[in-house]
Image (tube, rainbow, N blue to C red):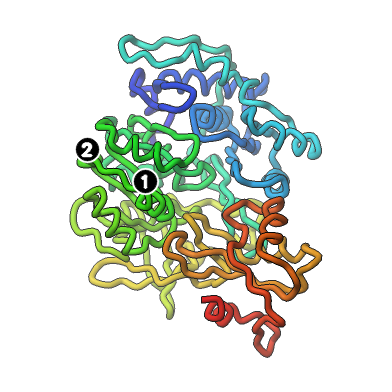
Amino acid sequence: MISLFERAQLYGDRRAIIAAEGTFSYRQLLEVSAGVAGRLLAGAADLREARVAFLVPSGWHYVTTQWGVWRAGGIAVPLCTQHPAPELEYALTDSQASIVVAHPQFEDRLRPLAQKLGLRFLRTDDLGVRRLDAAFQFDPGQRQSGVKPPHSKLPELSPKRRAMMVYTSGTTSKPKAVVTTHANLEAQISSLVTAWEWTKNDHILHVLPLHHVHGIVNVLLCALSAGATCEMLPEFDAEKVWERLVAPELTLFMAVPTVYSRLAAKPRAGDYRHIRLMVCGSAALPVSVLERWRELTGHTLLERYGMTETGMILSNPLHGERRPGYVGTELPGIEVKLVGDPAEIWVRGLGVFREYWNKPEATAAAFRDGWFLTGDVAVLEKGMYRMLGRSSIDIIKTGGYKVSALEIEEVLREHPAIKECAVVGVPDPEWGERVCVAIVGKLTLEELREWAKQRLATYKVPSRLAVMDSLPRNTMGKVMKPELVKQLL
């Protein structure tokens, strides 16, 4: 198995990253990430799977930090730039991070937490990333040598080593850390590079968050594995995205339904035939959005299905019919079967994660005879899979994010004006589902949102509020959420 870093050596002076910090080659990525690794090691021979949590915006600093952690032998724990202090603190304590890295713009948010928890704190400046920006500017007209930063001998990495921990919300009240090995990541990348025919001539525009598999694996790592160029925007801006989509060098674009919906709301005429593939995932794509996007660009979006625990599982074809409302067939290296009634998707393959961090019981419960139980329900019709929903109503898919209703409820119950509450997802054409809450108490939506934004990521804060005399419950005292959803429609 050839690693990402070995492949990057083959690409040398090809353009790797375009970001706010500048344009950088593969050679420069290797040199700077080696310097980052050396500073993380600080004289040690190997981080030995120490967890390194980092809060860095999309761009050159993110990529060099991520690669530096891996090359030092650590486990990368990317943090969400939207998360408030309580959620960041949870990730730091749950992952048992020993090193915390922050971009200067997030230093005030992360340094106090690192000090409180007694963790080693570093800014990306301390890792040499910013200092090397100017020295490593890409010049397509000459061979790049750069200024090689001093670094110690880097450890050799076994494919079996743990590489990354990404937090996902499940049926428990708190997010679980999904642990993937280097071999898991390589398998996920290889599957997509093969299925979607990535080459070194590709150029992708990256607008997705980088604490989720969609942005990390599907876009960034696939691009860097193939020797392609990854152009990274620090945040989503509809005008800037449209401006770049007409650029003739672009060949790929991937986003979530909410992004496509927002772009469709501010259309720009242009010729988009130079883009060979546009992909949509992380939530169900409304057929109306697919059709509107086809009208605007001439592209039929390729829908796919995957999970944090598995990487991508199913995909519509690169060549051939892309059926609206369907997520296609198994990707290379993936086995899928439907079990039960309703039929749950079970998955097996080299890309399936290793474990939930420090949760052996949850890990064991997620597998059956080597198969991972996704909790998602589907049917197979005319050779393609169609998703029917979730096996648990406590998982809400909103704007490409997968959030736990139980986690939100646990936080909202801390509000003094809330006696009881229940959180559900209500279908929405733009967001897939909106996070809605029914409460017994006295509170306005504005008051609730202002309070909740200090404790929850923005996408987890309810956008609808229903005040009730009592919540619908069954004879066992459990809230009947399907009934609640009907009342909120």
Q: Earlier in the sequence, mark 1 or mark 2?
A: 1
Q: Amino acid at mark 1?
A: Met
Residue 349 can be seen in this image: no
For the residue labelled by badge 1, is the local secondary structure a helix, a strand or a loop?
A: strand
Where does the image place residue 141, in percent across and percent down from the top left?
30, 11
In the image, is residue 10 above or below residue 1?
above
Residue 316 lies, with reference to residue 40, above or below; the image says below
Inspect the image, locate mark 2, and give the three-letter code of the amino acid beneath it. His
Residue corresponding to mark 1: 254
The secondary structure type at the circle numbered 2 is loop
Q: Residue at x 24, y 59 (%)?
A: 322
Q: Is residue 72 visible?
A: yes
Instruction: Kindly indicate the quadrant of the structure image that contains residue 228.
Output: top left
Image quarter for residue 462?
A: bottom right
Q: Residue at x 31, y 33 (%)?
A: 203
Residue 146: give x, y in percent of width and height: 45, 10
Q: Residues within 10 Å of mark 1 (few under 14, many from 20)?
A: many
Q: Are marks 1 and 2 in contact (CB under 8 Å)?
A: no
Q: Which residue is mark 2?
A: 274
Q: Nearer the viewer, residue 29 or 401?
A: 401
Q: Residue 227 location in percent, x, y?
A: 33, 29
Q: Residue at the bottom extreme?
A: 475
Q: Quadrant of residue 443?
A: bottom right
Determine whether, in the image, residue 104 is placed left or right of residue 232. Answer: right
Nearer to me, 489 or 78: 489
How many neighbours does mark 2 have within 10 angstroms: few (below 14), some (14-19), or many (20 or more)? Answer: some
> Quarter of the image containing the N terminus?
top left
User: Is 460 positioned to the left or the right of 222 in the image?
Assistant: right
Query: 315 or 439: nearer the eye?
Result: 439
Q: Is 448 left or right of 156, judged from the image as shown?
A: right
